[in-house]
Amino acid sequence: MKKRMISGVLAAVMLLSTAYAAEGSTPDGTAAADTAVSADAAEQTVKLVFKADTPLTGANGDMVTEILKNRLAALGYKDYTVTVSEDGTGITVAFPHSTQVSGLADYLVQPAAFTASDADGKVWLTNEDLKQVTSSKGSKDSTGCIVLTLTTKGRQSLREATTDIASRDSDRKLYIKVDGKTIAFPTISGKIDSSSVNIENNFTEGEASNYALLLNAGALPVGLTVSEAPAGNDKPIDGDDNNGGTTTEPTSPTTPTNPDTPDTSDTTEFPDMKGHWAEAALKKGITLGLLKGSNGKMLPNDLVRGSEALTILNRALGANEQDSTASLAASQQNQWYISELGKAIHLNLIDAADSRNFANAATRAEAFVYIVRAFVYDRAESGTDELSVFTDTGSMTTAQKQAAAALVASGVIKGDTATTLAPDKKLTRAEFVTMITRITGNISAEYTGAAGGSIVSGDTTLTASNLTGDLIFSAPVHTVNLSDVSTPNRVVLKGCDNVTLTADGQAGMSVLAADPADSANITLGDSVSVNTLVIAGDGGAVTFSGKAANIEITASNRVIDLSGMTADTLTITGSGNTVNLGGTVGAAAIESGAKNTRLSVDGSSGSLLVAGYGSTVGGAGHADSMEIRAAGCNVTLACDNKVENIDTGIKNVKIDIGVPTKVTAGGSLVSQATFSGVEGTKICKAQWYQDGKPLSGFGNDNFELTDGKVSKHTTYFTFTKNMKTSVTTGFKLTYVNPSTGETEEVYAEKTVPIENYSNEWYQQRDVDRVLKLVSSTYRGNYTTSYAVNNDYKSYEKETWVNAKGYSSKSSYLVWINRAYQHVNVFTGSKGNWKLVKSFVVGTGAADTPTPTGLTTVTYKLKAGWTTSTYTVRPVIGFYPDTGYAFHSRLCTPNTDREYDFSSGYPVSHGCVRMQKNDVNWIYDNVPIGSTVVIF
């Protein structure tokens, strides 16, 4: 970034040094950036063509061109041209034919829209408030920091925002977003009055640098879409070398100029691994055949895409069989990794109808689910107490929370910090392989007894072994015989087809987990003890005979035969299973998530809970006691004591919204929701609304609803002259009824009028503020985008010229504002000027400034001025008896073809440079004698 800044300063110095003779005898600028190419060369270029949703005429075209060049320069591209189409509907970037541009098109069209808003959605800061964006090392090891340097107006807005947010009763957060995605949400504890702000949220240094690069290059003023780009032919890191198919461009390339090429080298030494915190795990990943490098590098800090993560897991589990991928998203069908997705479906790593784009980088939360499914960490426990120390789990799905809790409990993952799990953070290659190597350190065809967990891919017979670490039998395995084998760890069947496991002798296992791709037959001898048997996955029959203290069925849609078993507890949490209970169990439970379970009891159960909607319970056996909590069940099993506790839900709950009769000027609104008609205690999702939209930060997914309970919310307003005159506050309860499986909602709202300040009050306040706000000093970064994105508001301009008491001999008044490089044109009369036009211009450079003062339009020249080096026309003079004037940008002598497009920053010898249409408008409309204000 520093290099770019220095280069920009040097370029500016060159422009200013030649600008001295702009209205004199020598050229005033540099040659156009886009040089012509021969016809033969043009035929061999690589082109990226973009369509604009708004015409790229005038300042829009200049700004988009500049921003694209800034982005390309920051990525290291040097040889290219940028051309706006003649009709202004599109823009083309052309490169020499050998240039690699994979992923570049999608990168260039990113809007880079920056906002900082409060919990109510009020936007306090935008791109207009950013003077410069850089990155640095974060306060924690291996993290990055985004450094925002604010404009004067931005600093003022930050001061006002933090003062307001810090005074609130709840949700004192400032939500930092880029293109609508929240990237950080710092808690505000007090007023911040600084022009430099550090943004941290456990970014990698690369992530922070990418955000800084994008924001510093500027926000696009129009929407761009890709209408033409070359098809990619590169493969992501760790792609399958043997798999054909097409590759589409990634949406956020790490290095668009250098596509990833899988490295076929067998080395475990890569220069960018040396000294890395995960060096040992990376070497292990290479040794196990899970990782490959790219162009001689391992790239440990690069993000791992979903496709790559699944490919790595498929390799670990020896996957070969593929299921149909027809139900996946259409965008995935022709990707290089489509066969890997087929394998992942067969292994139950993803669902057959998953709608995600697996070319995108995987989040930590997504990876948690991949790992749990791959190594069968499923558990019937639905609680997530292990996550209670983490404060950032609100965005996670239920499945992601349960997966994370299981992995935390097993020691596979840790928090990003002591109190944050960072579920939305993109996962790096180093982080992902570290998770895997914590589970297994060995992959081989047979069990070797080596330390650490093992993945075994061959049929196995083990005798009298004390296992070290988890023992995972992978997809190719069909037969496992264990005799006198004991382990305090887990024995896992994962992805096997038609597998048989038998265990006999004096053996004991802490956890036996079965998730076969097809069927599994498990038989334990009389002296074999298993603490917990887990049956997971989807589809295929599982038969179990033996003793287990606890049996947990998290699977869905399986046929499970437990006719020869004995257990203390049986817990079913998966849906759609058919379970034959032929043995004896102390306590059995069909939990609320186990909808449409078919349980046939031919043995006996001490107690039986039926909480899964639509379950069928029958058989020739018997239950001592039974509690039915779910509706829609068909229960015919004999029972000594049956109780029905069907949840009545919240359909009869009423919400009374208590609000004042009005909001007084400058005041806030305290809303109170009181609940009645509640039977018992229910855990609901509760959400406050304002004007029909949910309020960010004012929701609770675990709201304990009781009769008579009260919830309060305070709404703070920023009073403006034309603000809304009323506000509607609402409250919604959402409850998933475990007895019916239905989602029930209750909503209530009330509208409250808002009493505003008088027009006179706003007028006086605005006059005082605007007179202090307006400046004649340029503090920009010498780019056109700064002028486009930074300017006074229209009413501020009108307030200023009217408060200053300016008059004019005509009905026009012109204000040349040097601070933001705009010419503002007003019509009307003294005290009643109205803004009609505002143009981006280039005034005098730092050493030849346009003098401040009050003058008039003195003459007009349609033919303009022509020298041996340039033509500018038309010319509209101001400041009598001087050469100061409004005129066009520099054109080739005796033509209207511009060759120096400099505008939006101080660049001239004192005149005001304008775009052709703009200066012609001044010429045609503003009469001689009209007042011109320069400030």
Image (cartoon, rainbow, N blue to C red):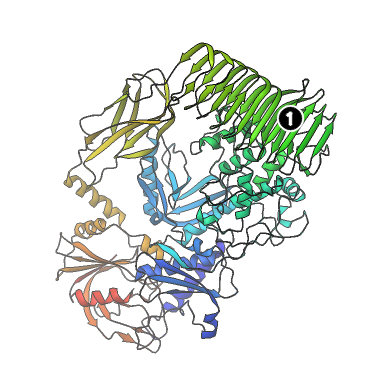
**Quadrant of the snapshot with the N terminus:** bottom right
Relative horizontal placement of residue 524, taking residue 708 as reference (left or right): right
Q: Which residue is mark 1?
A: 489
**Mark 1 residue element:** strand
Up-down relation of residue 252 to residue 671 (above or below): below
* Residue 725: x %, y % from top left: 21, 41
Query: Hey, which quadrant is residue 525 in on the image?
Result: top right
Q: Residue at x 46, y 79 (%)?
A: 30
Which quadrant of the structure image shows residue 375?
A: top right
Residue 629, above or below 788: above
Give coordinates of residue 737: x percent, y percent. 42, 27
In x, y percent, where is residue 156?
37, 49
Residue furthest to the right in view is 464
Q: Observer-nearest residue: 82 or 306?
A: 306
- What is the count of numbered marks? 1
Q: Residue at x 35, y 19 (%)?
A: 707
Rendered view: 876 above or below 355: below
Label 1 amino acid? Asn
Residue found at the far top of this picture: 640
Does residue 444 appear in the picture of this structure?
A: yes
Q: Is residue 778 visible?
A: no
Disc 1 residue crowd, few under 14, some 14–19, many 20+, Cα 10 Å:
some
In the figure, is residue 487 to the left or right of 675?
right
Q: Nearer the viewer, residue 582 or 396?
A: 582
The reply, left or right, for residue 642 in relation to residue 912 is right
Residue 907, given in percent of the width and then of the height, sits at 40, 72
Left or right of residue 160: residue 856:
left
